[in-house]
Amino acid sequence: MAAFEERKGHPMTKRSAALSYGVVLVCTCVLVAIAILPAAGAGQTAHDQEIMRQARRAYYNLRKEGLVEFQCEMIPDWNAILAAQGAADASANQRAMRTLEQLRFRVFMGADDNVKVTHTVVDSSNSRETEGLQKIYGGMEQMVVGIYTTVSPFLLTSPFPTEETPFHLEEVDGAYRLAYKEGSADVETRMGKNYGVSELKVTTAEFTSSIWPTFLKNPKGLLVNGYRATYKGANAPGEIGLLVDMAYQEVSGLQLFQALKVTANVGGETSRINVQFAGCQVKTR
């Protein structure tokens, strides 16, 4: 059975992640994440730069709070997943649960911001079950990596350009509209006067993606607690939608995921999965 395959790369290059759950849940969702790289260019007005400096400081940031790395056990809610499939055969559900409950997942994030998902391997002599398990392994990994990649600008780095990056900032309807280029991509961000991003849109020749994040007011800054996202490929027949809700737990003074609720819509079909995180360990500086 396939072992965990490590995926590396800057978040800007991680344009998509497939979500698939084998015979239990089949879904494909594309998650787009933006991380800002320095770019040479003329500076903006002192007023604009000051707004951006305040915006960068407005967010809860795990790195600024001292996080070096963490790892947690990830526990999928298999009962909810099976119930969502509407299987009529109770005995089939019981057989599936006996197999699924043997699975153990762990999530690790290091100092490089890359997330890894490892898992136990369940032996199976049934080729169909083996294929389904492989899809579950890959689907869980890709889902979690995609979500962490999507929210990393809000939790680990910054959703805004550096001081050296040319940008255009204007006030529209009592809020801010920020526009700039990242490589060949056009990036447009809308944020309120409290600097909370309400929409982040990325447009390239290959795709258009939008993310609408939501935030909690933490004493140490805005803490992302969910998002809605859409993705449309240039030649794709339809749009892919994703809704993610997050709950947090405090571990060694840091805010880490406690639970994720994911709803995906692909080709008119809706899939849902819930996961919990437990036994988390952190390393701080």
Image: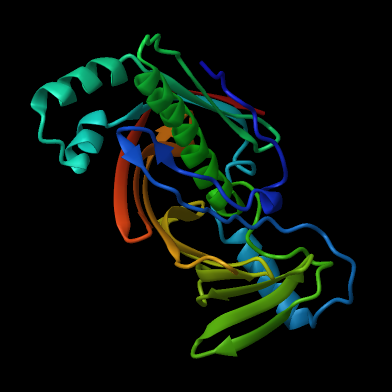
Q: Position of residue 94 (x, y in %)?
A: 16, 20
- Of residues 206 and 219, which is closer to you in this image? 206
User: What's the residue at 70%, 50% (across, down)?
Assistant: 13
Above or below 156: residue 170:
below
Q: Position of residue 284 (x, y in %)?
A: 62, 28
In screen coordinates, is 189 left or right of 165?
left
Q: In the rendered image, which quarter contains the C terminus?
A: top right
Above or below 80: residue 165:
below
Q: Position of residue 66 (x, y in %)?
A: 62, 36
Which of the 4 image quarters holds residue 93? top left
Q: How many marks?
A: 0
- Of residues 221 and 123, which is closer to you in this image? 123
- Of residues 53 and 184, which is closer to you in this image? 184
Above or below 67: residue 94:
above
Q: Can residue 80 be seen?
A: yes
User: What's the residue at 53%, 51% (across, down)?
Assistant: 151
Q: Can residue 155 be seen?
A: no
Which of the 4 image quarters holds residue 181? bottom right
User: What's the residue at 72%, 46% (across, down)?
Assistant: 10
In screen coordinates, is 77 left or right of 39?
left
Above or below 265: residue 9:
above
User: What's the residue at 34%, 35% (across, down)?
Assistant: 275
Q: Residue furthest front?
A: 127
In screen coordinates, is 138 left or right of 204?
left
